[in-house]
Amino acid sequence: MNADGETEEIAKIESLRAEKKILSSSWSANNLSTFINNSSCENYFSTRQFVNSSTQEEVDFPLAYSIVVHKNAGQVERLLWTIYRPHNVYCIHIDAKASDAFFDALNDVSSCLPNVFLAKKREDVLWATASRLWADLNCINELLVHEVKWKYFINLCGQDLPLKTNYQIVSHLKSIKPANDIVSFPIPKSKLPRYSRKWKVRKVNHGEYRKRPVMTNTAKSPPPGNLKFFAGSAYFIATREFVNWAMKDKTVIKIVNWSWDTFSPDEMLWASISRMPSAPGFRQPGNAWNTNEGKSVTRLINWLDSGKKNGYPKCKGFYQRSVCVYGSGDLSWLMQQQKLFANKFDPDFDDFAIRCIEEDLARRVKEEL
C-alpha cells in the first residue's frame, strides 16, 4: 500500500473509532472462564491458536516473564497469546484489589497453559510505591525455583505488546549475553527527594488515584552500601545470574528493604544496583555506560515530554498520564522500531492497532518455523 492509501485507510479507521464502531475483540473475564470451564483446555488452546512449536534455538534459550496486572483479563490474555511458548515460563501477579472475575479468568487461563502460573503472594499495588516493586520480586522468587532453567528475565504490564517474535527476542538476547538491558543514567536533582525523604501513602481527593505517596519532612538515612543513585525504569531485561544475585546479595536485600518508604523505588533500584561492581553484567558509572529509554531496546514508550527529544513522532492516539496510548496511526512508526516491546495499548480505544500487531507477529512466526 502506498503512502496515500495508508493515510486514507487510517482516516477511515479513526472515523470508525470516533463513532465507537470498532469494538474490542478481547474476551471478557466471564467469557474466558465460561469458555474454558464449559469446554476443555485442548479446545481453548486450539481455538485461540497458541504457538505450540519453536525453533531449536528458542527451545535452548528459555525466557522468564513477570507480568503485573490488575484489569482487563481479555487484554492480558491477548498479551500472553503473543509471547507464549511452552518452553518459557510466565508468572502473572494479580493485584490484591482485582475483581474475583478477573482472578478467576486468569486462573483458568493459566491452568490450561504449561509453565504459566499465578504468583502465590499478591500485593495491593499502589501507584509509585514499593508495592509495584514487591510484585515483581514475588514473581522473581518463584521463577528462580521453577524447573525451567531460563536464561533471561523480562517484566511487563498488562498494556504491553511485543514488537518482535520470541525468536527475534532470543536472537537479540543471545547477541548481548551476558549483558543486561537496564535503563540507568545519573539521577536528576529534581528526583533526589524521592529517595532522600520518607514518603507515606495517604488518601487524596484529587487526581486519578485515591491513595498516593506523599513526601514527608522526615529525611531518609543514607542507603546501605553507600549506594549511588541512578534513575531508570521499573521495566528491564536481565540475565538469570543478575536476577539471582539481586535476590541473594545481602547489600541489595538491605537496599530493597530500605527503599520501601521512597517514591517509585522500582525506577531507582534496578538502575542503581546494576552499577554495583559485584553485579553480574556490571556497567561502569561513567557517562559511556549510561542508558536512557531511547538507547534501551527493552520497551518503547512515547512520553509527552521526552518523546520529541528521543526523535519520536507526535502520538496519533491519546496521552494517558503523559504516555501515548497508541492508535492505528502509530502502527507504521511502531513497526519500524527496533524495540522488543511497546507500551501502551487499549483495545477499548483502538482494537485495530492491537489486531494488526497480532497478525504481523503470527505471520512472522510462520516464516520462522
Image (cartoon, grey):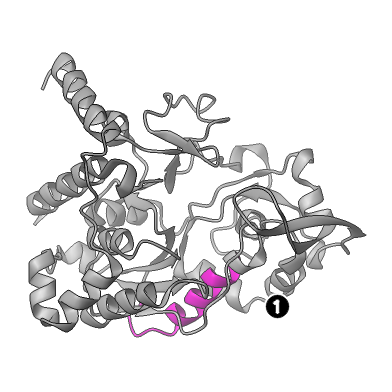
Q: Quadrant of the N terminus?
A: top left
- Residue 172 on the magenta span: no
Q: Between residue 327 and residue 171, name the one nearer to us.
A: 327
**Kind of residue at badge 1:** Lys
Q: Secondary structure at mark 1?
A: helix
User: Residue at left 76%, top 65%?
Assistant: 261
* Crowd tier of the residue under label 1, counting other residues whose Cα lies within 10 Å: few below 14, some 14–19, many 20 or above: few
User: In the rendered view, does 263 fall on the left or right side of 209?
Assistant: right
The percent coordinates of residue 257 (x first, y second) are 73, 73
Q: Quadrant of the C terminus?
A: bottom left
Q: Is residue 103 positioned above or below 79 on the image?
A: below
List the residue tagged with mark 1: 250
Q: Between residue 56 and residue 236, name the one nearer to us.
A: 236
Residue 87 seen:
no
Q: Quadrant of residue 306?
A: top right
The percent coordinates of residue 82 (x first, y second) are 24, 57
Q: Quadrant of residue 245?
A: bottom right
Q: Between residue 82 and residue 203, name the one nearer to us.
A: 203
Give the magenta part as a residue range. 133-149
Q: What predominant SS class does the magenta segment belong to?
A: helix
Residue 263 seen:
yes
User: Residue at left 25%, top 40%?
Assistant: 353
Q: Is residue 217 positioned above or below 49 on the image?
A: above
